[in-house]
Image (spheres, coloured by chain):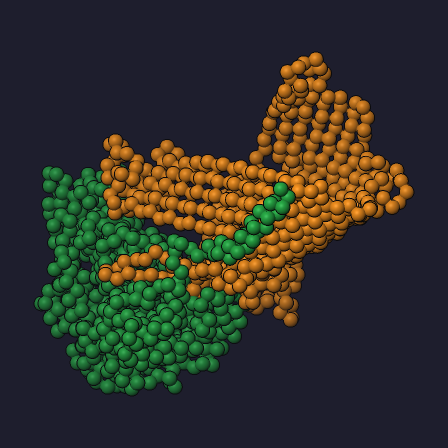
Amino acid sequence: MKKSKYIILGCVLVLALASCKKWLDVNKDPDNPTNQSVLIQNRVPWIEHFYQYTAGVTNYRTSCIAGVYYTNNANPNTFSTTWACTNANSTTSYQTFFVEVSSNLVDLYNSAQKQGAYHYMAVADVFHALGYMEMLDLYGEMPYTEAGTGNPSPVPDDGKAIYNGCMAKLNEAISLFAKTQEAGSPSLSAGDLWNNGDVNKWIKLCWGLKARYMLKLSKKADLYKPDDILDCLSKGPQSNADNTVGPGYNNSTVTDYLISDPVVTNGNWDYVAFGNTNRISQYYYNLLTNMRSSGVIDPRMSKIVPATMANIQLDASGKVASYTWKRSIGVDSYNPQSALDPLSLSNRLAKGGATSIQLQSYAAANTNIIYAITDNTDRANFIAAQVAAGRTYTTTGNNVTVTYKAGAMFINSTNYLYAGDTAYVNMRSNSIATGGLSQTDLNWYPTTPSATAAVTAGAVGSTGSFQVHPVSDQEIVTYHEMCFIKAEVLMRKNDPAAYTAYRAGIQAHLDMMQAKLTQWKAGGLNKTSTGIIVPDMEPMNQTDINTYLASSGVAQSAGTLTMSDIMLQKYIAMGCSIENWNDMRRFNFSTGNVGGFGIVYPGYPSIPRPPLFTGQSQLTGGSPTDPRYWIRRWALPPVYEIQYNSIHTLALNAHAGDPNIWSMPVWWDCATDDEYYGYLK
Amino acid sequence: MESDVDNPYWIINQNKLTSKTNRFTGGINGNFKITNWWDITGRVGYDKYGTNDYTFIAPGSALSVLYQNGRLSKALLDYTYITTTVMSNFHKKFGDFDTHLMLGTTSENTLIARQNHWGYNFSTSISAGGTISFSNMATTNKFFTDATTRKRLAGAYGEVGISYKDIIYLTATGRNDWSSTLPVENRSYFYPSVSGSFIFTQLLPKNNILSYGKLRASWARVGKDADPYATQTVVSSPISIGSFVGIGNYYAAGNPDLIPEIQNSWELGGEFRFLNGRIGLDYTYYHSETENQIGSPRLAQSGGFIFSTLNSGTVINKGMEIALTGKVISQKNFGWDVVLNFSYNKGRLGAFLPGVSYFYPTDAQFGTVKAASVPNGGYFLGMTGQPYLREKDSKGVEIPNGRYQVNPNTGLYLANTTNPVVGNREPDFIGGFNNTFRYKNFSLSFLLDIRKGGDVFNGTEYFMILNGLSKKTLLNDRQSVTVTGVNSVTGADFNQTYTAGQNYTIGTGTQAGSYLIQQYWANYAANSYNFITSVNWVKLRSLSLTYDFVGMFKNQKIIKGLSATAVGTNLFTWTNYKGMDPEVSAAGGTGGSGSTGIDYLGVPAVSSFTFGINLKF
């Protein structure tokens, strides 16, 4: 008995040891593939989408700085209205680039290199340049050489190193695109969401980016090379057919793994027109209706500035029978205004508060609102406004009761200061993931006080804006941008050919918009679900275009052309883009002290500060000629970077955590390296 | 509606959230005596539980537009854990030496299977009789994922011990583990230990004063492995855009070079009994260091990920525990026993990743304060925050307890935004004092819980000050506040009172007095030190009274005993903390032990009263 026990025991132990290794080999996740197994043709669409996303949030928030949009959301409102910049704005661009894109670039490049897929390596280089240049434009200094590789506390690089690194990547990309891929590697068309694998378009994209980036050095006497820029432009996009755009779709409600936004939509839309917080700003509106003080309406205006239905008459079943389109006006954050002045739309923010613009509601039935107005002048002005709008009202003492008829758009608040906010139409455009009625009806219908009344009636609350529909193209490098870059470079050389480039840019932009609008009309996006035509989604009227181009809104000869003309037309064409803020920094906003060109962005507030300005701690410069008078960069996001990496961050830039970091110029915004490194000390 | 907030009554009455767990545990033991000096013990343990979570969010809830027509989710978790142990025990006595040897192996096998079904948008309205089920949803609105996790560990160990009479005991152990969760080249790790004790009173003549005394010492190393799949970086679910499929990395990075955590600790101690056991004293001093702690902390996202699994740093704990017991009075009808405990622990973070000045093991960050561990010997349960800047001397060093700097651009105190350490949440010491009184059949005992030191951040007061709800903000009936200090730019004296109704020139603008008074309180809230207290407390942790009905059942055959007890817990707290209860950890965010010492809208510990009857058959 004893012996058999020993034998059994011995066998069991031996067996156990032999199978031990195999038994322990269970550490491979059976449900989630590892990153080693991803095909390069699947990496590229991911990178393209998430680059669009990080570019979208960046475009939106920097457009608030540049005066394109107003927002009533507290954090970006510090960009659009009060300039008391807050750290909460810094997080999304940073996180969505580093977490969603950067580590995938490294994996893509390495995997592609193993296969000899040179085009894919080149695509990784292009996104490397696009992404890190965005980081440089925003934050100035950022981990670069040590980034994206899983190193949890990387050492940052300064702006000069990042810039040179990105330019080197673009050069490498150009040479890699020119090569033929090794046999067996997938063709670029298998993964290219943007250009369908058209290598020539990619090469032109690279040259276009080089031109854009080289222009950023315009303040540096030693590094600004206009002839090199013109050379790059000659190899960049030559027509709208060469434009690189990222597509946007409205055919899926699937949301992404990090932020939970739809994965198929335009990145700019995800921030500008996803929710209810944004409006056109007075500054942008002015350029579209009164360029060069001509009073001539830009034909693009009705496509860019949203409109709401107004003067709605309902039929017996409560549906819209007749209506007019009421175009939005711009929210004014810049012109002097005072809370003590009598009630009028020109002092709306001063009287109501920086973030007080209200959302439009829809009256399904006659609705009475009682306003208590103690100030006599205000009450008189208020009553006059009701009369002008044709609304019935009654007064008892200080109370004015206004009746909003069934079908009216109104502001559902008893605060009389807000009652006129129906003049500011919501930028919102609906996707099927955010309440949209169908894949083709992108219009927004008010959902207050009733969630369904406006939809049932077919009462459109906003027609949205050209660049920020879910299905809009996200412009990456366009021919019109190339034209305006050329115009600026030639203008700096006093070359009269700048005028040709200026006109070409305007024409190119009009053509691009026209082509897209034609496509949308053909796709049925110009109709609401009830079949009402939305002219904002249809091509522009050729007569309007011709009138505008022949008017004084457009310079008519090289002799009358100014730098301001070029940059303001570029501003309209770029619209929701970080490039507007980049350009404004190069021209010192509205200081007027660059190259003898005068004030390039007139109307952008310099002295006095914007009326609701509370950014004294952030923008500490004493006068407009002091670079630190303006918003020159974003603070590093404390809760994602500085908090976890402070030793390295402060070693490079001792002031990265200072409240006035917002006014410190980035490397390309300084004339000399000495000036730049002086700021960092 | 998507930006609205649900009414709590809606949530209670309309939504339904349940969780149900079934658990089965069991084991089989066997002991086989092979010879009189060798026996084998075998054990198999089995633990299995299943948890079903059910969540129904009613149509009309304040969610994003997509989900406003209802949401349903069912989650199933199936956990199975099987262990086997086989131990061979040998004992032999050689004269006065008693020896034993134990050799054993163990295996652990964990399997976790998860399934998650969820969907939204009920096709037939629930109120119109539609069922709350997945059948009542369109196929495109239904989703399913599952995940399986496996972990296996094999260990082989041995222990050898020798003792001489009843005087000296010596034991040594060694164990080697092989874990599935570490990379193959690092998956085996060995950890030994050695301990000894010496009952020195056996060598001394019998003594009524020191009736028993033992000294002991030990050193031990323990190894620990990682979570399953921590060595891999996985990818997210594919996304379809147009005709293309995109796949990219998940936001947590794995680490293919993980090594096991190793904890080295040593301990010294003694046990002493005096007066034939009337008085007892136990003493322990310990020092423990855990190196290469495996964790997935949040670190700089410029590395490409939000979380990275890594061998992060070294945690050091050292401390001391003393217990004193005594039978103060021991008579037939009356007795009084006392137990007094005292202990302290000093937790420190050793080396950590270079470049990281503070390690944040939890997300507990409220107001201006963050729960932080400071590398290179700093506090493990530390706290970073934002104090006011004090006047600097000629060398640019802040004068301790000097006057505050005032920012001329705001007219208020200037804060130090470099995030310095502002406190240590670990107590200086803690103790307990337990008394039991026995009188005939009554027994009364009470336990006092004592603590000295350890900072607590009163986040509730911070929140109230910021919102003007604290009584502090009623200073001077909100009509005036005074700011005294030095101008941070010029160094000149600064003394200014702001009164409501007047205007003041601040920097380049003019501000109203009432506005400045509001800003004063926001500025007050910006100073972390205004809310940090080094907390001492004495808590009456429990008080209990028991009566034993001993005499009643002498001749009974069915009921053998009956006693009744009344217990109250957490009855009183005497403390210098001005908030509600200093014993809370932060509510919201990441709670748990990592956020101890941060009180943010925390609910105090509950006092309870229990009455019980104990019946013996």
Horizontal side, residue B286 vs residue A104: left or right: right
Q: Position of residue A459 (x, y in %)?
A: 17, 47
Q: Quadrant of residue A185?
A: bottom left
Rendered view: A463 above or below A289: above
Instruction: Determine if residue A59 is in view.
Output: no
Residue B7: image x %, image y %?
Answer: 37, 37
The residue positioned 46% from the left and 54% from the top of the image is A26
Residue at the location (65% across, 25% down)? B565
Rendered shade, chain A: green
Residue A337 to residue B345: above or below: below
Instruction: Look at the picture and state if A583 lies above or below A403.
Output: below
Q: Which chain is orange?
A: B
> Residue B253: horizontal and vertical position, in percent?
45, 61
Residue A362 in the figure: left or right of residue B608? left
Residue appearing at x 50%, y 44% in the figure: B81
| Closest to the observer, B607 or B478 | B607
Q: Is residue B309 visible?
A: yes
> Which residue is rendered at x = 68% and y = 51% of the image?
B159
Residue B569 placed where, x, y %? Answer: 62, 32
Q: Is residue B83 left or right of residue B6?
A: right
Quarter of the image where the C terminus of chain B is located: top right
Of A504 and B219, nearer the camera is B219
List the single residue furthest toward the right. Answer: B205
Q: Quadrant of residue A479?
A: bottom left
Residue B385, by quadrant, is bottom right
Q: Say whether residue B173 is left or right of residue A318.
A: right
